[in-house]
Amino acid sequence: VVVDSMPGARAAGRGSESTLAVIEALKHVGPAHPNRDSFVDALVRLGVERSTAVWLAMSLKRTPEGFRVGFDLAAIDALLEDYFAVDLWPVLGLGSRQDTQLILGDLSPVFAAEDRARCLALQEDLKLELVTLAAGHWVHVDDPNGLVKALTGPAQPTKEQ
């Protein structure tokens, strides 16, 4: 099961610009904060949505001096660089039946039109089960019921229009 994650290489992180912007904001706010609110406010001033900043603040580590960001941003950069460079399209084409389920958010920027067409072609070749949900990239937030149904219900691939 792949949830709104493009299997092909993506130059410059195409489709993940908002995620990359959050990582850059985390680099700019620094690691130490007197309290969670100051961390959230600093991220919001840098353009991060408040709900995302509040979510990130849940990961802060309490110290005697206040709170610290526990993310290894250098490691995250390296992992993302590798992720954006890897092309797994050939792996999806290897199956002789639907052995991979790809769940897409219909409003997600992660898949360009040509990527969606490639998914449809793999679905036609019965090498991929494609499910499209009424969601953006964060399908677990935008359509949690649809995601649960896709993961637990009978396979019912949908065609994008």
Image (spheres, rainbow, N blue to C red):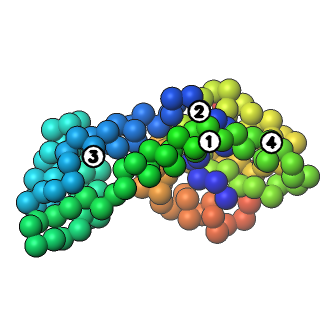
**Amino acid type of the residue that numbered disc 2 sits on in the rendered structure:** Arg
State left or right for residue 110 relative to residue 130: left
Residue at image mark 3: 26
Q: Quadrant of residue 83?
A: top right
Q: Earlier in the sequence, mark 4 or mark 2?
A: 2
State left or right for residue 28 relative to residue 132: left
- Give above or below for 62 relative to 150: below
Q: Nearer the viewer, mark 1 or mark 3?
A: 3
Residue at image mark 2: 10
For image coordinates 21% across by 54% down, the residue present is: 31
Looking at the rendered structure, which numbered label has been put on residue 90? 4
Direction right: furthest residue = 96
**How far is mark 2 from mark 1, CA to CA?**
8 Å
**How far is mark 1 from mark 3, CA to CA?**
24 Å
**How far is mark 2 from mark 3, CA to CA?**
22 Å
- Contact between marks 2 and 1 (CB within 8 A): the answer is yes
For image coordinates 71% across by 48% down, the residue present is: 130
**Amino acid type of the residue that numbered disc 4 sits on in the rendered structure:** Pro
Residue at image mark 1: 6
